Amino acid sequence: MENKELIKPTLLDYAILGLIQGQPLSGYAIRKMFEETALGNYSSSPGTIYPALKRLQKYELVQKVERDKTGKSSFEITKKGMLTLQNWFLKPVEKVDVEKNTGELMLRFGFMETLEKEQRIHFLSSIHDLIKIHIKGLEAFYYKEAKNMPLHGRLAFQFGIDSNKTTLKWCKKAISQISNNEPL
Amino acid sequence: MENKELIKPTLLDYAILGLIQGQPLSGYAIRKMFEETALGNYSSSPGTIYPALKRLQKYELVQKVERDKTGKSSFEITKKGMLTLQNWFLKPVEKVDVEKNTGELMLRFGFMETLEKEQRIHFLSSIHDLIKIHIKGLEAFYYKEAKNMPLHGRLAFQFGIDSNKTTLKWCKKAISQISNNEPL
DNA sequence: GCGCACATGTAATTGGTTACATGATTGA
DNA sequence: TCAATCATGTAACCAATTACATGTGCGC
């Protein structure tokens, strides 16, 4: 009955946790990561990162460690933080994830390399299967309604189908690469 | 010097404006649109829609019109709202848009069917050209850095390239369909 | 000596989420 | 008559954006 403090890290929180699993980073280094690397969807402004780090410390998912002579400090992930990250990785993929949160799925995937091979393949397979169903639904709708839709609506809808098909193909590719690579 | 009230509609605001250009809709009908149609990325909860409508009324971009006998009311777009929408449609496409806001570009595209053909093609061409450059940059980075990247990083990066290529192809398709359709 | 990148924050505002609240209408 | 859907809102909370603020260290 103690502190069941419900922790709901944001996507940015997870991105930070993912970044510092492995090696501690300073707040500034984290900012630069978001600014310069392909992780660039997440905001790198100080007004975003520093409050997020404060939040993560409050949750005890990261801790500040004083570094070397200069007195500059870095943030490292805690045990609890690693657990939270693992739970995120292993959270079952839902319909709604493939339909609306592809970005989150990719973020998860990008950071989950430390998981066992089967788990990573299971993750990709889940996406694959769900997205296949989703595409079927989209296409069924399309073939039924396309004639009544305005040109731009039709094209925008097609974009959705195309994007999902791309993700599907990517899943297959990724599964095969992970399977071939790192053979047991 | 009077009220230069800076109006920065959110994406949701634009989505609502786009929906009610043409015919007025009730708040509930708007919610159902977001909930049931492919526009489903935008939240349909009452706590989102009704405040948004209030905001849009404050900005004078929409106005409430009393409807028929039952007393139920709808929202219709105002002159100012139409202008705001047009300006949004015609806003030049920027690098950052194709790199991070594809969703917004698609929303714009989906609603801009009333624009002149050349303007719509120009919109798509802008995206096409910018995304081509973007892909070049991503690939250059990839061929240089891939060997130093972890497997999952490489795959996630590949997903980014694949997605952008899909958008590029879609642009070409859309341009050709708009060109062929509605010949002058 | 000047400017730039390094480095870390705070404050105000605001939009979105979640949960709550209420009432009418309709069909089984 | 009971449940579901129609229909419209409010309130608390919170994360992100933007702008401001401050100071260090390095290279030219």
Image (cartoon, coloured by chain):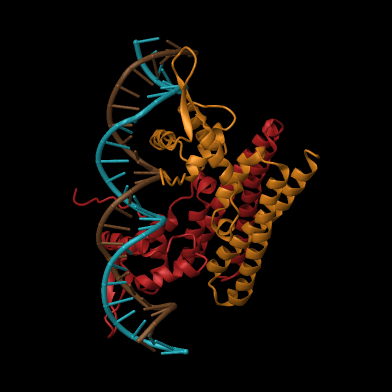
Chain colours: A red, B orange, C brown, D cyan
Residue shown at the point (57%, 45%) measured from the top left: B87
Give the number of callouts.
Answer: 0
The answer to which image quadrant residue A183 occupies is bottom right
A103 left or right of B1 in image: right
Quadrant (top left, top right, bottom left, bottom right) of the C terminus of chain A: bottom right
The answer to which image quadrant residue A135 occupies is top right
Residue D3's spot in the image, x, y percent? 39, 20
Residue shown at the point (61%, 66%) measured from the top left: A177
Q: Can the viewer see residue A67 in this picture?
A: yes
Residue shown at the point (35%, 70%) measured from the top left: A27
Q: Nearer the viewer, residue A183 or C12?
A: C12
A40 left or right of A28 in image: right
Residue B121's spot in the image, x, y percent? 71, 48
**Outermost residue, front side:** B1
Q: Can the viewer see residue A61 in this picture?
A: no
The vertical placement of B128 against B49, above or below, is below
The answer to which image quadrant residue A124 occupies is bottom right
The vertical placement of C17 against B127, above or below, is above
The vertical placement of D10 against A74, above or below, is above
Residue A47's spot in the image, x, y percent? 35, 61
Residue A25's spot in the image, x, y percent? 37, 73
